[in-house]
Amino acid sequence: MGATNARTALGTVLTFNGNTIGEIQSLSGTRSRRVIDILSCDSTDQAIEKIAGALNEGEVTFHCIYDPTDGGVYNDLNTDFQLGTKGLAGNGCLITYPSAGSHLCDGIISSLSLPSFGEADGEISVDVTIAFSGKATFTDISG
């Protein structure tokens, strides 16, 4: 067995609507494709066939440290959330991974938590979900 191709997440950067989101602690996302069931009265084997339907680029959810300062990331996210701002093209949701890989898609903030904490001496943080719109552009991680 050869060496792993695993990469560290350290250095991953997420921007939305031109604003860099700092201090992200975790990030996850999903994509899906609609599957269409096909069955007709003349299907001789009486089995449903499946064909690929539309692509759904899905969403990304991330957990980050709360920044309450004027011009801080929470204020930017909350403004975009309240206004229903759709981040478009280069100002959509851009995730840049270490070693230059990236994922870019138009998006809308669909969920923004209130600042929360799990322990009295823990950090205050927020959870954010961005719903993707249209087709994403991927750039492979080099090497």
Image (cartoon, rainbow, N blue to C red):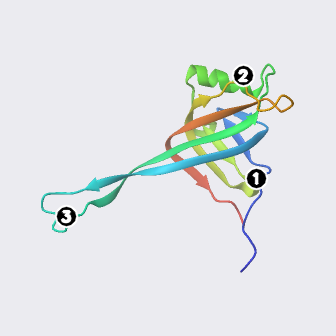
Mark with earlier residue (2, 3):
3
Judge whether 37 appears above or below 67 on screen.
below
**Image spot of residue 22 (x, y percent):** 78, 36
Label 1 packing within 10 angstroms: few (<14), some (14-19), many (20+): few
**Which amino acid lies under the numbered mark 3 shown in the image of this protein?**
Gln
Left/right of residue 41 with respect to residue 1 in the rendered view: left
Residue denoted by label 3: 46
Label 2 and label 3: CA atoms lie apart by: 57 Å
In the rendering, which numbered label is found on residue 9? 1
Disc 2 is placed on an element classified as helix
* SS assignment at label 3: loop
Lower sequence index among marks 1 and 3:
1
Give the CA separation, mark 1 to mark 3. 48 Å
Identify the residue at image location x=71%, y=52%. Answer: 97
Q: Is residue 10 visible in the rendered structure shown here? A: yes
Q: Nearer the viewer, mark 1 or mark 3?
A: 3
Give the residue drawn at x 29%, y 54%.
37
Give me the residue at 65% from left, 21% from top. 79
